[in-house]
Every structure is written in structure tokens, then in C-alpha cells.
Amino acid sequence: MADLVTVVTSTWQRPQTLLRAVQSVAAQTYPDVEHIVVIDGDDPHTVDTLDREGYSYGLSRLRMVSLGRNWSLYSGDGGFGATCRLTGAWLGAGEFITYLDDDVTYSPEHIEGMVATFEPSTQFVTCPWDGPVPQCPGPPPGVCRTDTSTIMHRAIVLRDAGGFHPDGYAGDGYMVERWLAKGLTWKFKEGATVHHPNGVHHGGQMP
């Protein structure tokens, strides 16, 4: 039996780009995935979009959660979805937790390839991406070499090393650099299966 993978997406008022992300999760070849979309405040259009795609409030493999306010605006710290990601990660039931920004897509084989890269001692895996967002080549993971949507980690990492910080945009590469400083073990999956807007979708079947 495959281990459950939790995909966490943060979003607010971008239902059309979110729809592409949602469809890329639905197209995954990996057999056991839950997708938790955390909406950063009041956003009825996004709720309607997710409802049409089969997402619901409450326990479900396709789940949406609405925060009581937009925390990026309310806190004034420019968190850019960190609060949503932290919320979704704690709600997730998967052995593995990964992230997908609402304007990014996965190739169908992305989750399967990331899980296959783990060894028993591996605590997190990263990979490259394609598209216009700049990146520094190759491993090790870190600032400008890691993007939110290229990270997968074991759930226990949240307990032992923490996750995204809601106090400002101290995420992505900064988070995995904190993990490295704490001695976490990692592997790098070759090949871009994460696609930013206008990227080349290697093997993907995006609409």
C-alpha cells in the first residue's frame, strides 16, 4: 500500500490559476493523494470553483479550508501564504507533505517521482523547476535553489524541525536551510516536474 501524500495549496482570489493547479493534482499517477487548499480569508469565487471540482469542508481527500481573515494583509508582514501552508501542513494526514502554489502545476509523474526518491533515512526531497522564476543550478537545497512547490518532506519534520514561518516570508530556501542546519538528511530529484507560468510542461497534460 502506498503512503498517503498531502498536497497543501495556499490561495486567495485567484480561482482561474488555482484551477490549473487543482487539475494537475487530479492528474497525478501516484495512487494515494489528499489535497488541502487553504483560502486566506473570505473568497466566495474560489470556494465555488473548488466546490465544482469536488472539494468540500470537513474530512475529505479533496478538502478546502477558509481562514477567518486574510493573514498576509492583516499581519502586515508580507507572509505570502506562509500561514496557509503552516495550517494545511498541520491538518494533513499524509506520511509525506508537499506544497503547490496556486499559480504552479505538477507534471502527472511529479508526486510519484518525489516519493520514489526517498530512502528510509531521507527526511526531505527537493527538485528543480521550469519557467521564468530564476533559480540557481543544482543542489544543495537553499535560497534560489528551492521553490515552495519543489519541497516534499516527511510529516515528522514538522515536529522535529518546524515548517514555514508565518512571521514574514521566511519560507522556501530559508526553511530548508534551517533544516540543513539542524542536520536533516535530503535528496535531490533530477528533472523538472514543477512548472511555473509560461514554463515548458515536460510530459504534462495541462489544459
Image (cartoon, rainbow, N blue to C red):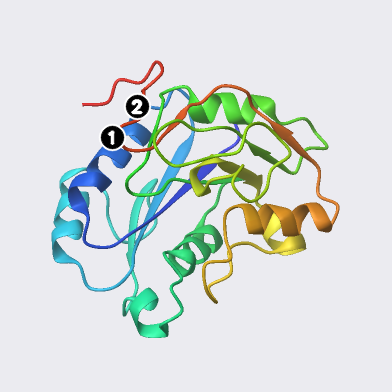
Relative to 65, is 17 above or below?
A: above
- Element type where label 1 sits in the image: helix
> Which residue is depicted at the point 30% across and 41% down?
22
- What amino acid type is highlighted by mark number 1? Gln
On screen, residue 56 versus residue 166, left or right, reads left
Say if 37 sits above or below 144 in the image: below
Q: Name the residue under label 2.
A: 27
Q: Quadrant of residue 95?
A: top right
**At x 60% / y 35%, what residue is drawn?**
3
Of residue 37 and residue 14, the one placed in the foreground of this image is: 14
Left or right placement of residue 156 versus residue 87 in this view: right
Residue ID at (16%, 50%): 49
Quadrant of residue 204 within the rendered picture: top left
Say if residue 1 shows up in the picture: no
- Percent across and percent down for residue 33 are 46, 37
Give left or right: position of 198 versus 135: left
How many numbered callouts?
2
Location of mark 1 (residue): 23
Whether tag 2 and tag 1 are in contact, CB under 8 A, the answer is yes
Q: In which quarter of the image is the N terminus?
A: top right
Alpha carbon separation for disc pair 2 and 1: 6 Å
Locate residue 106, reporting x and y percent: 41, 32
| Tag shown at residue 128 | none
Q: Look at label 2 and name its amino acid.
A: Ala
Q: Where is residue 173 in the image (x, y as percent from the top left)?
A: 62, 52
